[in-house]
Image (spheres, rainbow, N blue to C red):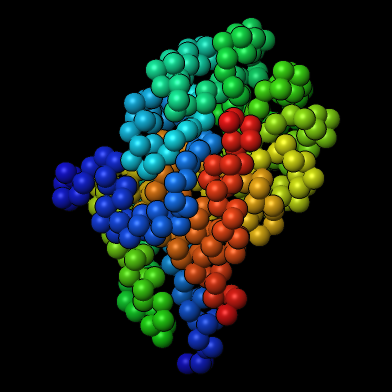
């Protein structure tokens, strides 16, 4: 218990004033739904936040989430090639292969060819890039080359396209046009440019929008502007949590009048087209 | 006092609450030393019955979420604190969107 007499841990996310919110959220999830979280982290961040494979499993079980894409945080222990944090994610995947879809992370400023090849060889199923943490633009030639490498081996790429981003659509569009088969996940649904992204990427079916820690009003605009078959739920654990992010997504779905038959796709089916 | 159409005044009041929630949430993310003060401002903005009383069900939830968030934040338990603020903000924002359609 906390000093204020509250529950601690996972229970605190759904107790007290959150209890009725969580009850509403669970009622909006179709019965038997096997929810797929398209955005979560395992490891350590320079800001002090951490998450383990076991921590993810506990949170997933508590919220009836069956699968999560996981990748490293902005790890203070990242060597030049990010191999250490990538190994942490791989170990978590090996311990619980049914729960996790492992993505690796790279720093495009540094020599990434060897780690890219090692992770592909090992069986990682996607690449995570964070333009804010690693301080690069999406049209940087080193990044454009990396997108090309991912397209060549048919590797999905999840891009942080959320908080602190200032340029998303304009620098990314040439890559999307050059590599129409490249599977891209816009983490945080292109947040500040969500409407422009919905318009410009509408004709590019291999670009998915992922909803983690996006405000419900932004998601409302997205759901009103884009085929819901292009939108996938994410949590951004440990920055987000399942109850509040599921609530945001489903409340926005309701407000936008998205037909019920699209909810299974948003919570699972749309991202499962790529990851089974 | 100018008499405002009910929906406009309700919208204005909810925009106020939403704005203070936004400031508080940002301060929590940025680990501002004034975060507790800004949560307190959000709490104050939702205090008392809203115009006409039509939004009391929403505001009751928002008040409870902010109050608990502040307590969790004081206990240095960030996930339940920020989660409650996010939900309070989302509920307020979508209520404003719905009011715009009335």
Occupied quadrant, residue A118: top right
Image point 63% across, 35% down: which residue? A273
The image shows residue A47, relative to residue B28, as above or below, that is above
Camera-side residue of B17 and A51: A51
Residue A140, x across and y down, in percent: 74, 26
Q: How many marks?
A: 0
Residue A125, x across and y down, in percent: 59, 22
**Quarter that holds the C terminus of chain B:** bottom right
Horizontally, is B29 left or right of A5 in the view? right
Residue at the farthest right position: A178
Residue A113, x across and y down, in percent: 67, 10
Camera-side residue of A20 and A212: A20
Occupied quadrant, residue A217: bottom right
Image point 18% across, 45% down: which residue? A2
Image point 31% across, 50% down: which residue? A14
Camera-side residue of A137 and A96: A96
The image shows residue B61, relative to residue A225, as above or below, that is below
Q: Is residue B54 visible?
A: yes
């Amino acid at each position: 218990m906390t000093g204020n007499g509250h529950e601690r841990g996972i229970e605190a996310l759904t107790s007290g004033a959150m209890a009725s919110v969580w009850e509403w959220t669970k009622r909006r999830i179709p019965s038997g739904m096997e929810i797929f979280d398209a955005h979560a982290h395992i490891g350590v961040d320079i800001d002090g936040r951490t998450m383990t494979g076991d921590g993810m499993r506990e949170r997933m079980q508590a919220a009836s989430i069956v699968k999560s894409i996981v990748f490293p945080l902005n790890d203070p222990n990242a060597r030049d090639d990010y191999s250490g944090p990538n190994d942490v994610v791989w170990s978590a995947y090996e311990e619980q292969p049914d729960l996790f879809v492992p993505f690796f992370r790279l720093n495009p400023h540094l020599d990434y060819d060897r780690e890219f090849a090692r992770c592909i060889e090992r069986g990682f199923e996607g690449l995570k890039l964070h333009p804010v943490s690693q301080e690069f633009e999406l049209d940087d030639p080193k990044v454009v080359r990396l997108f090309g490498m991912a397209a060549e081996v048919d590797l999905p790429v999840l891009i942080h396209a959320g908080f602190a981003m200032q340029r998303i659509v304009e620098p990314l569009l040439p890559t999307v046009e050059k590599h129409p088969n490249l599977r891209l996940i816009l983490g945080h649904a292109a947040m500040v440019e969500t409407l422009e992204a919905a318009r410009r990427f509408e004709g590019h079916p291999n670009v998915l929008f992922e909803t983690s820690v996006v405000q419900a009003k932004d998601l409302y605009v997205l759901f009103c502007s884009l085929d819901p078959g292009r939108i996938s739920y994410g949590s951004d654990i440990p920055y987000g949590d399942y109850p509040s992010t599921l609530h945001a997504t489903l409340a926005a779905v309701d407000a936008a009048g998205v037909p019920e038959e699209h909810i299974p796709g948003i919570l699972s089916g749309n991202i499962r087209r790529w990851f089974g | 006092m100018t008499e405002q159409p009910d929906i406009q005044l309700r919208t204005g009041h909810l925009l106020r609450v939403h704005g203070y929630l936004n400031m508080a949430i940002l301060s929590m993310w940025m680990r501002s030393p004034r975060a507790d003060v800004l949560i307190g401002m959000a709490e104050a903005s939702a205090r008392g019955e809203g115009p006409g009383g039509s939004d009391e069900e929403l505001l009751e939830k928002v008040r409870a979420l902010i109050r608990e968030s502040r307590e969790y934040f004081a206990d240095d338990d960030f996930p339940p604190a920020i989660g409650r603020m996010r939900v309070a903000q989302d509920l307020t924002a979508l209520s404003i969107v719905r009011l715009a359609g009335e």
